[in-house]
Structures are given as C-alpha cells and as structure tokens.
Amino acid sequence: MSRDTKPRRKPGRERRALDVVVVGAGINGLVAANYLCRGGHRVTLIERKPRVGGACVSARMRHGGRNVVYAPGASVLGMMQTFVFTETGLADAVAVFKPRHPELVYFKDEPDPVVFYGSAARLAGELRRKCDERGDVAGFERDLEIVVRFLRRGFRAATPPTLADARKRLGGRLTSRWITGSARALLDHYFTSDRVKVFYAVSVTESGCVSLDEPYSAFTIALMSSGGIFDGKWGFVKGGIWKLTEALGAIDRALGVRIVVNAKVTAIDPDARTVSYSRRGKRRRLVADRIVLATDPLTAARLVNDEALIGKISAKRFLGTSGKLVMVFDKPVVWKGDTGARDFASALPVIMLADTLDGFERATLRAGRTSVDFAPGFLEIYPEGPAMRRLGARSRFHIISVFFKNLGFDRRGRDLPAVERRVSDLVLAKIANPDDLVRTLLLTPKDLSEAFFFPEGNIDHATLAHGQTFFDRNYSADPQRSFYQLGRYADVFVCGAGSYPCGSVAGTPGYMCAQQIMRLDR
C-alpha cells in the first residue's frame, strides 16, 4: 500500500496519515471506514461477499414468475445516532420515515390493542384503562429519558461507559436501578401490571436467552431506546433497509475508500500488521498501520490465530433465539380495527404471546435450555409494505416482516412448516385481507448463522448478558486505555455488533472505534 499521502495538520499538533485495513463491510465496517477516511487516513475495506452490507442486504425469491425482493436480515432502522446519519452523508443519500402513529400492542386474544402513546400522561391513561396499571408511568418515562441522554452523550464523545461516569452523571440510585440492576426489579419498581411489564421486558431478550433477574439486564431496556435518528423509536428506509448500506458503500468509495469484495481473509499477522486474503484464485497481502475487524468477536480472534483469545471469547454466551418470518402479499395489507388515523397501517404492532412476567421468562429460558422448536414469546411486526407506500416506493408485492421469539438453534426454517404456519396464523388474525397472502419464508437462528456468520445465530453477535454488556462488552486486554483493541494487539481493533453498545444497523461501534484509533495516534 502506498504511504506517500501527506498527513493532515491540526493546529498545534500533527497527525500521521495511517494505512488502515478494515475487514467486514457491514454497517460498522462502512461507518468506521467513513470516519477514518475523512480523518485523513488511507483505508482499504475487505468484504468476503460480493457486495457490502453484512446483514443489512436484500435477497430475492420467485413467485408467479416475478422476483420478490425482501430483507433476509435487518428490516428496520432505529438505533443509529443522528450525527452518524448526518456526518457520513447518509442523510443526503436516503429517505427515511418514522410512522407517526404510536406502537400497537396486542395481548393474546384481546381484539383491541394497547396504544403506547408518546405522551407520558396519555400513555398512563391508556395503560390504566386497558391494563389496570397503577404505577409510576410518568416516572419511568422521565428516568428512561435521563439514562438515554447519558448513553447518547457517551456515544457522541466516543467514550466507553464506566460505572464511575454513570454514578457521576446519573447518581447512585439511577445507576443501580438502570445499569447494574435486574430488569425485573426495575419493572417492579415502576409498574403494577404484568402486561405492561411484559411489554418492556421484550427489549431484554431480543439478543438471546437473558433472565429478567440477571444483573445488568435492566440496562438493555435503556440501550434499546437510545437510538437518535427516530428518538428511540423505529422506522424505515425508502426502497428497503439495504439502501442504507448500498448508499454508504457508494459514499465511502467517493471519499477514497478502496473497497474489495469477493475477498476472503485467510490470515492476519497482528504483530507484523499484515492481512492476507484470496480473491479470484489469487492470494494477496496488505501491510497496514492499523487493522480493524468489523466482524463478530469469535471470527476476529480466529483471524489473528490466538488460541488463548479464541478460548476466552468462545466461553462467552452467544446463543440467539430470534427468528424472522417474511410474509408476501399481492395487495396492500389492511389491518383489522384500522381507525383511519394517520400512519395506522405502517405503525409497528407487537403481539404478546405471554401476558405474565413469569410466563414470559419461562418461554425465554426454555429455548436456551432444551432442544425446542418454538417457545412462544412475542411477535414484532414490521409493516414494510405500508411503509414503502407511505414513502412513495411502489412494488408489485407488499411485505410484512415478523421478528419473533423464541426459536431453538437446531433446525432451519424449511424444516419447521408447523412453526411457519403458526406464526403466520397469529399475524393473519390481525389482518382484514388474509387471503391476499401469497408466500411466506421462515428464517431461524440457524439460517441467520449460515447466511451472515452470526455465532450461534445471535443477531447481536453476543448476548447482552451479565459479564458481557456495558463496560464488559469489549475484548481488549487493556480496556481502560484501548477499549476496542482486540486482545493484547495494540494495532488491531474489533468493532462488530458484538462490541459496545451492540448492533441493530446503528454503526455506533464502528464510529467509536474509529474515534479511538484517531485519538491514540495523536
């Protein structure tokens, strides 16, 4: 690699332009490459697959002689920070949309949903009427916002989280309740209704089998509300979520990032700082000043061939139990009970299949302890078809994606027709035109593992569990000095979804890792 580019100069200091190799062109690799390139470094981005995007890509299936384009991995956008969206150039490249209608939550056989309004006062009234909730709804919303602001401040500053900083900014009471405490204790503090508690418990289990009684399980509730682009909520990208990574790949290329696809990394020498890869039958080797592994942590450890590090990371909890059902309709979906309110059709419904906290907990843990096909927990419905129509993107087919829990890791979706039918029927019970469904496709944790290299099918590359969340969600031998460092290697970093804070098409680990590299070089 060439080293003749002149370094950029800052007042009072000089930064050397570095040769950086980024491995993995998912959202974190693309974001890291973007910031490093704009910071004056020469960046080569290596991707194993034929295109960038990681788990944020499109796929095709055939129906009636036509292509149906769908998202096999991520479906919605929400945890990205506004500054990442703006500074990378994405804000000028893609159109996004957050439904104005609040989230709809259906409990078991109840025909009418609970509407989770954005106004704390209105929400408290709704929860009292429909769930007999008599707790401190306003206090929960107030304290959640305080903790979310603390998290966003850390993201922006690219500073790893610490309990000392949390206690300084939040105080001991909120730190013990929202950071180090259990989700059950937090929910019991604010709410009286099991149904309300179950709804907020959903966030805790999305990354895997996490007990509501685990220390630090409360933290995930705030973490999953910390997205900036839609103020803690979820929304859609015009044309499909994959348009986001396609656009960022094009932006990075225009900046000067060299993107090499169809390239399989075969070896990394962390001491010599070399990356060897094969492409089209030819072997190549790059020499770098810094190496960034935007992969899952286990792959990162294997690439540097460090047996001790492999063993340490392998001992962590990875098991994922999230599945996805893609439902294809040949006419626009019409929801039962549509009030005619703006964006009702594109609001995000959740169907709760357990209405007690203990029942929810049993289903969560059952998928991790036994060989079970499906332990019903909840269904999160992403109405992509209605959202695309709202954005002005027309398609022959109308897609609804269902993210749901809890599936075992043993079997592929094609081997579970009964589960596919059951989940489909649960969703169709809320739809007024079920006969317009023409195709379904079930993707299990095993499918996701094989398609996207998720360890044990975990969408966040590692479970958000005690001992591997907050400050402990790192793989560095010296996290106080170099949080995103991989093991003992001072010039090798890891920033996939398994790094703090987590994945969800946010790019936050990629941003924070890039900032750390640039600071270390000052």
Image (cartoon, rainbow, N blue to C red):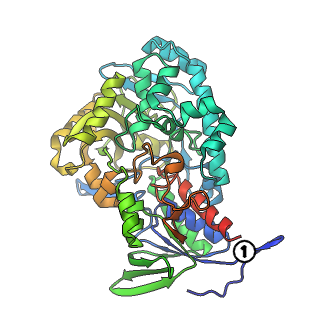
Residue that numbered label 1 is attached to: 15
Residue at horizontal 43%, vertical 37%?
204
Examine the rendered structure and indicate whether residue 350 appears above or below residue 152: above
- Against 514, residue 189 (above or below) is above
Picture residue at 62% right of the left edge, 69% below the top: 36
Please say whether residue 24 is visible from this viewpoint: yes
Residue 487 versus residue 439 in the image, above or below:
below
Residue at image location 40% in from the left, 80% down from the top: 277
Q: Nearer the viewer, residue 275 or 448?
A: 275
Quadrant of the snapshot with the N terminus: bottom right
Q: Nearer the viewer, residue 68 or 330?
A: 68
What's under tag 1, amino acid-wise?
Arg
| 418 lies above or below 357 | below
Q: Is residue 437 visible?
A: no
Q: Tell whether 322 sits left or right of 289.
A: left
Residue 469 position, x and y percent, is 48, 46
**Whole-percent x, y for residue 66 in the image:** 28, 57
Provide residue 384's location: percent of width, then percent of height. Answer: 41, 44
106 or 170: nearer the viewer: 170
Quarter assignment of residue 212: top left
Query: Residue at position x 51%, y 38% from top?
Result: 219
